[in-house]
Structures are given as C-alpha cells and as structure tokens.
Image (cartoon, rainbow, N blue to C red):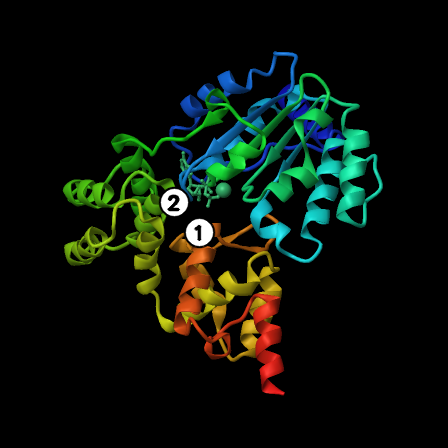
Amino acid sequence: YEEKVIQLIVKIILIKVNKTPIDVAKHPLGINPRVDDLMKLVNIWANDVRVVAIQGMGGIGKTTLARALYNRIFSKFEGSSFVSNIKEVSRQPNGLVSLQNQLLHEALKGKVQPVSNSSQGTSVIKQRIHSKRVLVVLDDVDHIEQLNALVRPTWLSAGSRIILTTRYEHVLNVYGLKEHEIYRPSELNREESIQLFSFHAFGKDQPIEGFVGLTEKVVSATGGVPLALEVVGSSLFGKRSGQEWNDTLEKLKKVPPLDVQQTLRISYDGLDNLEKSIFLDTACFLSGTDRDTAIQMWKGCGFFPTIAIKVLMHKSLLKISEDDKLEMHDLLRDMGRQIVQEECPPNPGKRSRLWFQKDALHVLKGLK
Ligand SMILES: Nc1ncnc2c1ncn2[C@@H]1O[C@H](COP(=O)(O)OP(=O)(O)OP(=O)(O)O)[C@@H](O)[C@H]1O
Ligand SMILES: [Mg+2]
C-alpha cells in the first residue's frame, strides 16, 4: 500500500514540474559507461557555463546518448529543455520559431507567451533565460543560424549547460569548442554489437542455437553502428533458413565499410512494392503525421496499409510515437528521399514524389 502511495506522489510531482524522463532506446546497450564519460565533461557541479558537443556519424547513437544524459541530470537544473530534430524542423516554414517556442516553454516552465518570429524569439530568449540555471539540449544541429537563434553560452546564468549533438565538424567551430568539450561516441564493441543485433533478430541478448556463427559473421560485416545493427538484425527476425542469412551476408560484404545508408538499403530492397511505397511516402512527407490520418490517405489511394505498416515496424524501418504519429529515423528518411531523387535526378517532374516546396512549385509552373 505504502509503495502505491509513493508511486502516486512521484507521479503527481512529475506532472506538477511537467517533466518525465524521455525514452532512450528499445534495447539500450553500453549507455551507462558512455554517459559516465560525458558526465565528466559536463561536470554539473562547476559554477561556470559549459557547452559539450556530441559529434559523430549518423546512426552512431548521439541522440540516444543525449537523451540518457538528459534523463540523468535534468532534475538538477531550475529549467531544462530537450530540443529535438533541429536540422529537419528548422527547414520547415516557421520551424525555427517553433523550436524557440519549445525552448522557452520548457525552460521557463510555461511562464511565457509564444513568440511569432525568430528575431523576437531570440530577444525574448536572451532576456528571459538568464534568470534560471538551465540545461538545454540541442539535438541534430547542422547550421550556425540554429545556434544563433536558439541559445548562446553568453546568454546563460552561471551553472547552466548546453549539450549539442551534430554530425558536422563545422558546427563545433562556431562555439569555439575545445577538444575536451567534444565527445565522439565510439562504435559498439563486438560483444555489445552481438547483443544489440540479437535483441532485434532473436528477441533476446544472444543468438539462438544454430545461429552463433552466422550471427558473428553478419555482425562483423555490419559494423558497430547501432542503427545498422538494429535494421539488419530486424530484417532477419524470424528468418530461420541459412540461405536467407547467407544472402544478407553477401550483400553486406559489397557495402563499403561504415556506409550506413547502403547497409540500410539492403533491408529496403527486401520489401514488397506496397511496403516500399508506404516507406517512401513516409520518408518524403508523412513523417510526424498522425497514423490514422496517414492510413486514411493511403486507403484513399487504394492501398491497404495496415499490414505493411506492421512489417515496416518489425523491420525497424518505421516507428509509431507515443502520441501515435509516424516516425522515421533521419538516416532512413534521407535514404528514402535519395531513392526518390534517383528516379530522375535532373528532372523533379519525373519523380514519384516531391517534398521541397521549391521543386513542387517549379513542376506545377511547368504544367501551366
Ligand atoms: N547504445 C545503444 N544501444 C541500443 N540502441 C542504440 C544505442 N545507440 C543507438 N541506438 C539505436 O540506434 C539508432 C540510432 O541512434 P541515434 O538516433 O541516437 O543516432 P544519431 O547518432 O543521433 O544519428 P543521426 O546523426 O542520424 O541523428 C536508434 O534507433 C537508437 O535507438
Ligand atoms: Mg540524432
């Protein structure tokens, strides 16, 4: 009984402070030692303002680490905000403004009116944010503008921290970060890779009988990038014939080392036509859309998407968020868009899907 009361109190407090830990990964592996390393760089007890960057290739686990780090330390700050998907959102109309509003709302716990343009956003953030010791995570930064619009270390009060994740070296120069302020996650080691792969291929942390040798071979051909292990592992879930495994192995051997996109492509190539269509539609314009809305749309096109969606989820090519929206990892989304672009590189009008406003306008004008 006491335990239930305590759980209830904890829940009420979390609702009151409007904070719950964020989801890290389906089968997290090797997270704690990496977060321990990051904690040393972040040093939350030092009374200066610090910036720590997590930099590395796509799919290596930067966002996952930033989430785990955030969960571990957010409660030590007076305000905190985890701003996700900055690269993608900032390219949408009014994207930067919506990111600014998210940052303001979360860091100041709702005690602020939304802003309507980005220069107003920047000045409100400057004025208001230094009143609190804050933790700001900027996930997937690819452009200086995003940092200038959202937060600069000089705007913050003592003890605050900025954590950013990026694929790109040039972003690190903007804040003038020194080597000891940059964390570059390593690939998973052999043991961790086998465990992560096995979770997705067999539903447990080691290969089932008869698949130990094949697993070792496939894992070593896949490499230690978590996203690749997840997608390749999931593509072999339920496949119990050695032939299917050997086919995958042959295809993996043709992929240049660390070319994650080519690795992911193997799983895409194994889909049927309907599954491919659903994947490409989501990559090009439906990521972030409500699942039911997307299903209605596909049904309107004469598709029966429910089973295809399930297949894509099983293959880790698509996720459904807690609030029931279609979600796709940014590398998978980029791969999908590239596949469409390759249908006819010089002429957008001959591609099956258009997602850039500029391309769409260009094609529509040409039709007149
Ligand atoms: N340590 C880990 N254990 C288990 N799964 C992991 C781990 N790290 C990452 N993953 C999984 O791998 C995938 C890629 O990770 P993540 O999104 O963090 O990569 P990223 O470096 O942020 O990529 P990008 O540059 O595209 O943003 C995710 O699905 C995540 O759940
Ligand atoms: Mg990321």
Residue 229: give x, y in percent of width and height: 32, 44
Three-letter residue code for mark 1: Leu
> Closer to us: mark 2 or mark 1?
1
For label 1, being within 8 Å of ligand 1 is answered: yes
Q: CA distance from mark 2 to mark 1?
A: 9 Å
Query: Which residue is pictured at 65% across the width and 12% down the height?
Result: 47
Residue 338, located in which quarter of the rendered image?
bottom left
SS at mark 1 in the image? helix
Local crowd size for mark 2, using a 10 Å CA cut-off: few (<14), some (14–19), many (≥20): many
Q: Quadrant of the C terminus?
A: bottom right
Residue 79: give x, y in percent of width and height: 72, 27
Query: Which residue is pictured at 40% across the width and 60% down the height?
Result: 311
Q: Nearer the viewer, residue 338 or 6?
A: 338
For label 2, being within 8 Å of ligand 1 is answered: yes
Q: Nearer the viewer, residue 75 or 170?
A: 170
Left or right, residue 283 beside residue 74: left
Local crowd size for mark 1, using a 10 Å CA cut-off: few (<14), some (14–19), many (≥20): some
Please, which residue is most extreme toward the top here? 46
Query: Which residue is pictured at 62% across the width and 51% down the height?
Result: 89
**Where is mark 2, residue-wise?**
227
**Where is mark 1, residue-wise?**
331
